Image: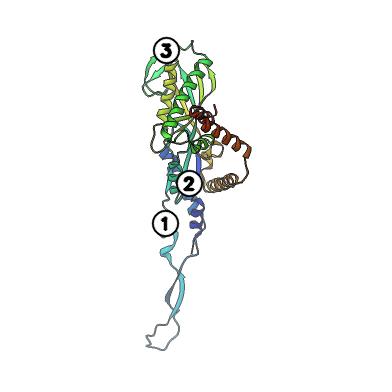
Amino acid sequence: MTTPSVRVFHKLEGLFSIYKPPGVHWKLVRDTVETNLLKGINAAPPPAPRQRVQFLAEPTTVVAEGSNELTLSAASVPALAHHPLVSGPEFQHIGVGVGHRLDVFSSGVLVLGVGQANKALTDLYRSHVTRDYTLEGELGMATDNFSHTGRLIERTTYDHITQDKLERVLAMMQGSNQKALLTYSKVDMSTQGAYELAVKGELRPDGKSPPIMTGLRLLHFQPPHFTLEVQCLNETQRYLCRVLHEVGLELRSTAVCKGVRRTRDGPFTIQHALTHQHWTSPDVIQAIRQYRSSRKASKAKHTQPGKDTGTASQRQEMSEEAAVTGDSHRLRSVLTSKAFGS
């Protein structure tokens, strides 16, 4: 018979996202979530105590003098060996898995999985999902770890840097990363399959690859401070800090990272990430249900026939024209522009 605690645990088996604050290790965040979920599971009303048969002596009655007879009667009594105060809570540990981790310095979306969902968590990140970050940079200094918390190595001027110069550097860096993505995807650029992958934005590295930025743009510029939005694959937070350092070098100056915030991790966005006060069983169950319903709606939307037929026919005509004329260079440019929105 399934107990209420087991039913609550089954509802918690799924994927959900939380908002990791900066300055906190991801292990502490995971342990806090696990502790809160255990409290919610074990707070479910316990099942009715098991009963066992016990023979009890009946009350003493008036018997004949010298009689040694003892009268016993069968009775059903609670089995104390299964009482929560004796056996302890029903759940003492649950497996909470962590997706793509964030270091202590970073904040943002952190995806977790409970129980059997840990397998789905592994499958999710084998599919090369992209992640979005907001990077806060400051010009004019360089440190040993590329962040403002490191040991200061150098100070430089930045008065010569303009927004146009910064945007040109970002465009150059994005172009080099686009070429790297096409290289590591290992697809034949002259095929229809490669074209369809590119126009859908589904080009991904085939196997292992270094970190690759699929998008890079400037959000805010007020010297010495600036903010970038980055979409990337296979990245680490140290790599993102190094990106800002390289931006500073390309501008003939220096730059450090003052903040890394993940705003999207695959299908999980920062709008649906649970903040600290919502790391409870009811909120997690609701988040898991919302994620499942959104995935079902997304699948149903993509399986609808006859959608975007005009655009598809235009793509087909462009592909056929390039193939007939033998203009493979034109097709390659179409692939690049469609894949990255340039």
Q: Is residue 123 left or right of residue 311?
A: left
Name the element at disc 1: loop
Mark 3 is surrounded, within 10 Å at the Cα level, by few (under 14), some (14 to 19) or many (20 or more) other residues, namely some
Q: Which residue is mark 1?
A: 88
Of residue 237 and residue 247, the one placed in the foreground of this image is 247
Q: Give the crowd class for mark 1: few <14, some 14-19, many >=20 residues within 10 Å.
A: few
Task: Name the image quarter holding residue 98.
Answer: top left
The residue indicated by pointer 2 is 36
Q: Earlier in the sequence, mark 2 or mark 3?
A: 2
Measuring from the top left, give residue 165's x and y in whole percent.
50, 15
Q: CA distance from mark 1 to mark 3?
A: 62 Å
Amino acid on which the number 1 mark rests in the picture: Gly
CA separation, marks 2 and 1? 17 Å
Three-letter code, disc 2: Asn
Mark 2 neighbour density, 10 Å: few (under 14) some (14–19) many (20 or more): some
Q: Where is residue 243 shown, x and y percent of the image?
A: 43, 24
User: Which element carries disc 2, helix, strand or loop?
Assistant: helix
Mark 3 highlights which residue? 156
Quick one: label 1 or label 3, which is nearer the N terminus?
1
**Compared with residue 294, is residue 217 higher up or lower down, i.e. above or below?**
above
